[in-house]
Image (spheres, rainbow, N blue to C red):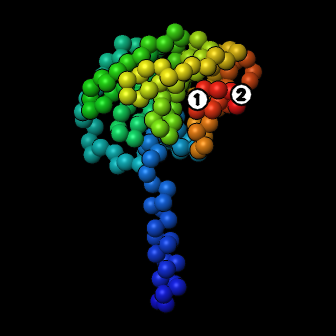
Amino acid sequence: MDSRSSSVFLLLLLLPAVGAGGEPPWPRAGRDSANTSLSPYVGPGDNTVRWRFEVGGFISSAPAIGADGTLFVASVNSIFALKDNKLRWSRALDGEIDFSPSLGPDGTVYLGSRDNRVYALSPADGSIRWSFAAGGMISSPVVVGRDGKLYFGSVDGYTYSLNPDGSLR
């Protein structure tokens, strides 16, 4: 193989590594923009329950998994952050949460509620960074675009787009 062919071959080998890095392994419902719901991890070898955590209510949506392995689970009107089988924090909201939380590139937790609001929570402690009031109940998960912009629907008939700071685009 000549040096030009070797360079092209080496470049092709390195291309998959270029995209690796900061994106959480499961940042939104369905995992990726194609909603494949396929995990990047090999599953367990048996069906033994390793741990479980009682949230005190029903869970109607899939969790999101942060880059550090933190599991974000919504139940009724609360969200829980679980790490290493322990509760890191929980946050109650004013309305019920019907959809899975989504994670931004910086780890911010985004979720909509039946109180007509989308919330941005700190992944470290669950504090509310900001909330945005839509014209009606939030009717879809918050989708985070590659550019960090947020998209969601509301029962008022609108699709909204927000900047990562919560301002309307």
Identify the residue at image location x=46%, y=67%.
14
- Quarter placement of the C terminus: top right
What number of labels is visible? Answer: 2
Q: Is residue 164 above or below residue 15?
A: above
- Residue 93 pos. (x, y %): 49, 13
Q: Which residue is drawn at 65% across and 30% down?
A: 162
Residue at horizontal 26%, vertical 42%?
46
Q: Considering only order in the chain, which callout, 2 or 1, is on the residue closer to the N terminus? A: 2
Name the residue type under label 1: Asp
Find residue 20 and report its image quarter.
Answer: bottom left
* Residue 64, label in figure: none
Residue in the foreground of this view, choosing between 72 and 132:
132
Return the residue at label 1. 165
| Dot 2 alpha-carbon crowd within 10 angstroms: few under 14, some 14 to 19, many 20 or more | some
Compared with 4, 83 (above or below) is: above
Identified at 41% across, 37% down, the residue is 66
Give the number of the mark in front: 1 or 2.
1
Residue 159 is tagged as 2
Residue type pointed to by label 2: Thr
Q: Horizontal and vertical percent for residue 153? A: 67, 25
In the rendered image, the residue lying farthest to the top is 94
Residue in the foreground of this view, choosing between 112 and 163: 163
